[in-house]
Image (spheres, rainbow, N blue to C red):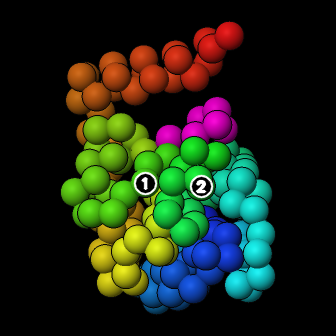
Amino acid sequence: MIVAVAGDHAGFDMKQMLAGVLADEGHTIVDLGTNSREPVDYPDYARAIGAAILSGKAERGILVCGSGVGACVAANKIKGIRAGTCHDTYSGHQGVEHDDMNVLCLGARVIGTAPALEIARAFLGARFSNEERHARRVAKTRDIELNQR
């Protein structure tokens, strides 16, 4: 799978680890930065992940910040992006299977590298179920996104 990875300064080390291991496991990694621990703003990286997915340069994205929350809020402002902060494997795969999540957000100050890798694997291994009830709910969510005033 082609996976965009990005993160702010707090997520830099975890993003680097995930990119390396996932590449070793056969995924094509599109690293969108940051490239150091120097302070940067997480919305810039949420925007980069969204652009990569919406343009087709990546199928899914993994976005890492300190808590996972700020990056998730920013990513969900982008039409067509369905991001979730997940700190357990169940949420990592269920968010894809039921909610068609396309961006996984992780908090590098919340979980360790081993759980983050397990969650990323669950996220990348999952597929949207296309069950009628899930498709209906995703469509309703998309309607909210497109018809806000």
Front residue of 112 and 104: 112
Q: Amino acid at mark 2?
A: Ala
- Residue 80 lies in the magenta stretch: yes
Pointer 1 residue: 85
Residue in the picture at 69% in, 60% down: 42
Main SS class of the magenta portion in the image: loop
| Nearest the eye: 32 or 29 | 32
Estimate the x, y position of residue 109 in percent, counting from the top left. Answer: 47, 74
Classify mark 2: residues with Cα within 10 Å, few (<14), some (14-19) or many (20+): many
Q: Is residue 64 above or below residue 10?
A: above
Give SS at disc 2.
Answer: helix
**Residue segment shown in magenta:** 76-82
The reply to whether dot 1 and dot 2 touch (C-beta < 8 Å) is yes
**Where is residue 46, by image quadrant?**
bottom right
User: Which of the 4 image quarters holds residue 148?
Assistant: top right
| Residue linked to disc 2 | 71
* Residue 131 appearing in the image: yes
The image position of residue 118, as x and y in percent, is 30, 75
Residue 97: x percent and y percent?
Answer: 29, 44
Question: First in sequence: mark 1 or mark 2?
Answer: 2
Q: Is residue 36 left or right of residue 145?
A: right
SS of the residue under disc 1: strand
Q: Residues within 10 Å of mark 1 (few under 14, many from 20)?
A: many
